[in-house]
Image (cartoon, grey):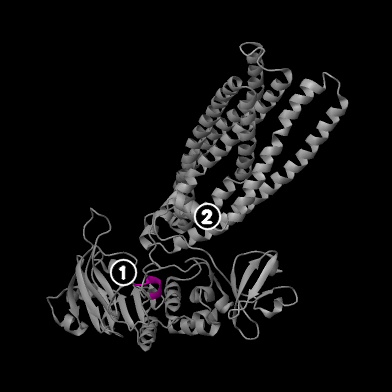
Amino acid sequence: RWWREDVGPLVGHRTLSGAPVALLWRRGGYVAVHPATGRETPVERANAGEFEPRAVMFYRPLPERRLSPLRLLRFCLAGTRRDLTSLLLAGLVTVALGALVPIATGRVLGEFVPKAQTGLIVQVCLAVMLSSVVAAAFMLLQNLTILRLEGRIEATLQPAVWDRLLRLPTKFFTERSTGELASAAMGISAIRRLLAGVGPTVAQSVTVGAMNLGLLLWYSVSMAFAAIGMLVVVAGVFLGLGLWQVRWQRRLVKLTNRLNNQAFQTLRGLPKLRVAAAENYAYAAWAERFAHSRELQQRAGRIKNLNAVLGAVYLPLCTLLMFMLLAGPARGSMSAAEFLTFNASVTMLLTSVTQLTGAFVSGVAALPLFEEIRPVLDATPEVRTASTRPGPLSGAIEARRLSFRYTDDGPLVLDDVSFEVRPGEFVAVVGPSGCGKSTLLRLLIGFDRPLSGSVLYDGQDLAALDQSAVRRQCGVVLQHAQPFTGSILDVICGTEAYTPEEAMAAARLAGLAEDIERMPMGLHTIVSGSGAVSGGQRQRLMIAQALIRRPRILFFDEATSALDNETQRTVIESTKALNATRIVIAHRLSTVLDADRVIVMENGRVAQQGPPARLLADTGGRLHELVRRQLA
């Protein structure tokens, strides 16, 4: 019954013709909009089979500029005008009906009871009961509207934050821990859980409090100011306690992120810890931070308990103070009926202010979680809507005077590096450790921005291109790349809809087909991180993932270091048959000799480049020296 559940606008397809159709939500259900005539046909059980079971949903992305809180609020509230109008009308009705309770209390206890006017008492009681039912109905409408608003805001903002997070530059992720990234990814849902119920509380407290404040000023301005003074003191005390509690909660959020990150790193590196017999040290490091987190929880809990105690005693104390004022300085200023009305209004106003203070504290408690999301909102996406589509790439690449450093005060990792790669050329990049080979590869695929210079694909500057579209035409295997958890079929295919036959063909190109055929589950064998396969199988699995799209450009960073010579030969021949441009970082002599051209790097510069035979013949050259050391 998907046509009865509002999940936003959809684009579906007709089952018979495959023609696209817009599915839009109208009151109570979906309608199918004809793309040519605009005619709307309600979707019901009888005609639901006319549409394919899969449709495309749309999510609004965040604006690409930095978002201020006001802009973020506008983004969240877009399309909620009807709900906001319902909320306002329900609040006005609740205010009007809520004034009846304190007025009726004063009239009944101050006038009707002393005069034994039973008929009027019954009438007022019935009126109060009826108004309470009506007020409860409007308050229910108000709360349902707020809950719908909260759900709609979360459904809009959480996917938008995920979209922004996935489109951020790679550098953003290298500068943050796993715990910080996890908090940023699911921060909106965490804030929603923390603030659950705060919206209805605020709406109810504001409407009831505003109405009762008006009654106080109506009956006695002087006593109203005395009551407002009490309100300020009570609100100040609860607000101070709340902010004190948030101070510890803020530290607890940061410590929890560190604990999550430490737990992730410990479990991921457990084999290394066991090899070093360092499990006890890892446990001690975790236990120290865990004990600190428990201490912070206890401190926040003590403040919460104090808050609860004060919440139980402040109302009787304030009522006693009002009686003392009436018996002293304010003697004779109000009749018994007026005072009873006034006292009921003060009690309701105090309750509303306390609820508002608690809601404010909950909002402040959500600030540490919002601060975890703030870097995502402030960062600039890597792929912008104004980026140029690269079109089909031929494989021509040029590095033009590239310079790069990782930190502003750090040394240059790359210094004025320039070279050109022709379509279909096989280029090997070699050099000693730390010379900038992997950094160069990261710049070529757009993972980092150069300090100066540019990377050109078919003469187009990579910085101005849609880098995701560029990478979709490239096959990349980075150093120490790890497969994600899933079946071998899922790892090779990724998010693309390839058939098992295509995945097996890619595995055959990577020299992995025989290994898969020997596995009992074949392509459906589950791979969990790097522990389920050997180092060579892991590398071949990542190579198969890179080759399944038959890319025009291949980037390999030590992608065959764990392979034997025969398997490496299979991979080299397979990639050669693709007629793709290949840029390979390698140390093996066999890989270097197969290349059309070798680029030798040293201290972030290009020391030599040319055909491998010519460079090896130069006995005083850097490549000859590197090969001599390897053979020695």
Percent x, y for residue 364? 51, 40
Question: Do the numbered discs 1 and 2 sit on residues whose CB atoms are within 8 Å?
Answer: no
Judge whether 238 appears above or below 560 on screen: above
Q: Evaluate whether residue 406 shows in this view.
A: yes
Q: What kind of secondary structure does the magenta stretch mostly adopt?
A: helix
User: What separation in Å lies between label 1 and label 2 (alpha carbons)?
Assistant: 31 Å
Q: Evaluate whether residue 278 shows in this view.
A: no
Left or right of 245, for residue 316 = right
- Which residues are drawn in magenta? 465-469
Percent x, y for residue 323? 67, 16
> Quadrant of residue 420 in the image?
bottom left
> Residue 76 has which mark?
2
Number of numbered discs: 2
Residue situated in front as seen by the camera: 513 or 298 = 298
> Residue 125 has which mark?
none
Q: Which residue reaches farthest top?
A: 328
> Residue 463 has which mark?
1
Whether 466 is among the magenta residues is: yes
Left or right of 156, for residue 439 = left
Whether 421 is among the magenta residues is: no
Left or right of 407, for residue 169 = right
Indicate which disc, 1 or 2, sits on the residue closer to the N terminus.
2
Residue situated in front as seen by the camera: 463 or 156 = 156
User: Which residue lies at the image location 27% right of the left edge and 72% below the top edge?
Assistant: 455
| Amino acid on which disc 2 is placed | Cys
| Amino acid on which disc 1 is placed | Ala
